[in-house]
């Protein structure tokens, strides 16, 4: 698993704009788009965590977890 993670990190790094002159032309667009997609996923994940951290959201989740707990207690 560590090797797979290292390979994916290397592929991600190759898509960085600083490596424009070093990438093979055949993989240029693919690597740049992969780099952009990973960055977009990281931004969206961070934004989702901020939204979940909101006190109102946690209050709704608390009510849901209580109802689920009561259902589990009945089993």
Image (cartoon, rainbow, N blue to C red):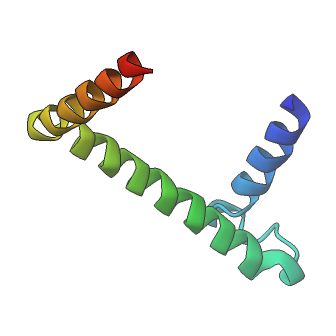
Give the left or right position of residue 66, taking residue 31 as reference. left
Q: Which quarter of the figure is the C terminus placed in?
A: top left
Q: Nearer the viewer, residue 52 or 36?
A: 52
Residue shown at the point (58%, 58%) measured from the top left: 38
Q: Quadrant of residue 7?
A: top right
Q: Residue 10 at x, y = what percent?
A: 79, 48
Give the left or right position of residue 24, taking residue 73 as reference. right
Residue lying at the far left in this picture: please name it: 56
Q: In which quarter of the image is residue 63?
A: top left
Give the left or right position of residue 9, taking residue 68 as reference. right
Residue lying at the far top in this picture: please name it: 73
Residue shown at the point (67%, 72%) measured from the top left: 32
Q: Can residue 53 be seen in this view?
A: no
Q: Which of 66 and 6 is in front in this view?
A: 66
- Above or below, 31 against 75 in this view is below
Q: Which quarter of the figure is the N terminus placed in?
A: top right
- Above or below, 23 against 69 in this view is below
- Above or below, 24 against 58 in this view is below
Residue shown at the point (85%, 82%) measured from the top left: 25
Residue shown at the point (80%, 39%) measured from the top left: 5
- Above or below, 36 against 62 in this view is below
Q: Residue 19 at x, y = what percent?
A: 72, 63
Give the left or right position of residue 22, taking residue 15 as reference. right
Q: Residue 23 at x, y = what percent?
A: 82, 70
Q: Nearer the viewer, residue 65 or 47?
A: 65
Q: Can residue 8 be seen in this view?
A: yes
Q: Residue 39 at x, y = what percent?
A: 52, 58
């Amino acid at each position: 698993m560590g090797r797979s993670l290292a390979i994916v990190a290397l592929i991600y790094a190759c898509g960085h704009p600083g490596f424009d002159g070093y990438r093979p032309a055949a993989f240029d667009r693919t690597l740049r788009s992969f780099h952009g997609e990973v960055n977009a996923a990281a931004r969206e994940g961070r934004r989702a965590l901020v939204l979940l951290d909101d006190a109102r959201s946690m209050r709704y989740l608390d009510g849901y977890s209580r109802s689920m707990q009561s259902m589990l207690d009945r089993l």
